[in-house]
Amino acid sequence: MKIQSILGTLATLWCISSYSAELDRASVEKLLTNTNGIDKPADLRRKDLTDLDLSSLDFTHADLWGSDLRRANLSNSNLSGLNLDLTVMTKINLTGANLANTSIFGVHMGGANLSNANLSKSRFIANLDRSKLNNANLTQADWGVDMKNQPMGLMRVSLNNVDLSGADLTDANLNRALLRQANLTGSTLRNTVLFGADLSGADFTNADLSGADLSGTNLTDANFTGATLTGTRFTGATEKSLLKGLETAKNLNSAIFK
């Protein structure tokens, strides 16, 4: 069993076995209102918040560690700077939410909706397969593998079959990420680090990959139709002749293949 699957299972079991109470929106709003901020954050640790409408709330002075947020609606909410490690977030709605500088580690977020969300400078090591991240802001996001901190084996973000169309990944780090069949059409990947990532079947149609590092990546069946490849590095990646749409790419002559 893959380490990310194990973590997702453990996180689910931890939450299910540790709920202290079920809360409704009014109860959550009361807790958020009564908090005095950093010294005494609103205590939502390990709480069952499944299916709740928590949209447009400010959680910046809340403790949500280990809570169950499956299918909850947190659209347009402020979760910036929070530690959301070991939460359960399958099919959560985070459309337009602010998760800048937020940490999410060891979490299963399959099928989540993060369209138009602010994920700048966030740190994710989670499973986001089949999630929506279209038009999301991932500038300077650190979702790559930390090779100096792998006590449980290779921990990496999984973004298979995700929708990243129109997303901004400028200066983001997604080294060794899983991005099979990812939709990156029209996205901005300027100076994005994708070293060692699995991008097989990914669609980069009309994407801007200027200065991006795709060295050592798996690009089998990847589509670069109309993509901008100014200074893009492909050293050690899948053979150039096997890449789709490369003949229509912009500034191909400045891309680095050796």
Image: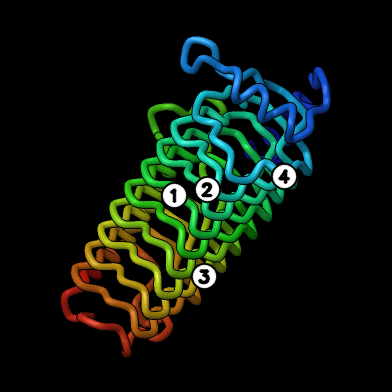
Which mark is first along the chain, 3 or 4? 4
| Callout 2 secondary element | loop
One can see residue 117 in this view: yes
Which residue is under mark 4? 53
| Callout 4 secondary element | loop
Q: Which amino acid does label 4 sit on?
A: Asp
Residue 250 shows which numbered tag? none
Which residue is under mark 1? 118
Which is more foreground, mark 4 or mark 2?
Answer: 4
Which residue is under mark 2? 97
| Callout 1 secondary element | loop
Which residue is under mark 3? 183
Give the x, y percent position of residue 181.
56, 68
Real-space CA distance between mark 4 and mark 1, rounded to the nearest whole angstrom: 20 Å
Do the CB atoms of the residues marked 2 and 1 lie less than 8 Å apart?
yes
Say which residue appears at 37% left-offset and 82% top-offset.
241
**Left or right relative to 257: residue 75:** right
Real-space CA distance between mark 3 and mark 1, rounded to the nearest whole angstrom: 19 Å
Real-space CA distance between mark 4 and mark 2, rounded to the nearest whole angstrom: 13 Å
Which is more foreground, mark 3 or mark 1?
Answer: 1
Q: Residues within 10 Å of mark 2 (few under 14, many from 20)?
A: many
Which mark is first along the chain, 2 or 4? 4
Q: Which amino acid does label 3 sit on?
A: Asn
Real-space CA distance between mark 2 and mark 3, rounded to the nearest whole angstrom: 21 Å
One can see residue 258 in this view: no
Q: Which amino acid does label 1 sit on?
A: Asn
Front-lying residue, 91 or 76:
76
Do the CB atoms of the residues marked 3 and 1 lie less than 8 Å apart?
no
Work out which quarter of the rendered image holds the C terminus and state it.
bottom left
